[in-house]
Amino acid sequence: MKITDPVAMNGYLTIYKKFEDGSLEYVIKDDPNVITYDSRRVHLQYLWDYANAPRDELSGFKIGNGGAVGDDTQGNNNVKVVTPDPKGTDLFSPIPLVNDAIIATPSNPVTLPDEVYLQIVFTISQDEANGFKINECGLFKESGKMFNHKTFISIEKNESFSLVFDWKLRYV
């Protein structure tokens, strides 16, 4: 990246199953998502009116089962992934979670001088959300407002694995 390159902030999501033996099964890898218009406006306000920009940090995560319609049984692929609305304020159909904590880590300017991102990781444990078909997720701010929204083909959650969501918000 050069100083003259056009700059945009984009979110990329990787989802993988983590099994008890430590093995991983990737479901989605570096797939883009929708960052809400409200979040984009607040982010830009930091650049031109920092003193008056609202402080509204990322604070939690939600999953849901309203991000895809149709059935993928017996080899029939009749599933349609619903497109997220950048004006949206919540997931289409949230699933209640006990733990919605996120871990946020910025990129390291020494080891990765040409990378600028914030990595956010969220894990659904083996004991949580079992029996649900998860097909949407989003990051949420302290105010409760949705930051971004991602929909995908359903992942049927069961107790044999934890489900890890690894989000990178990048300047590209």
Image (tube, helix red, strand yellow):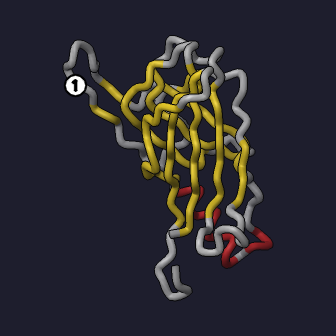
Dot 1: within a 10 Å radius of its alpha carbon, few (fewer than 14), some, or many (20 or more) residues? few
Q: Nearer the viewer, residue 127 or 19?
A: 19
Q: Nearer the viewer, residue 144 or 61?
A: 61
Q: Position of residue 113 (x, y in %)?
A: 65, 74
Q: Tag 1: residue type?
A: Asn
Give the mark count: 1
Q: List the single residue furthest toward the right.
A: 51
Q: Position of residue 129 (x, y in %)?
A: 58, 17
For this view, does 67 lie left or right of residue 10? left
Q: Residue at x 73, y 44 (%)?
A: 103
The residue to which callout 1 is attached is: 77
Q: Residue at x 65, y 14 (%)?
A: 127
Q: Residue at x 59, y 49 (%)?
A: 147
Q: Position of residue 161 (x, y in %)?
A: 56, 21
Q: Nearer the viewer, residue 115 or 20?
A: 20
Q: Position of residue 85 (x, y in %)?
A: 42, 46
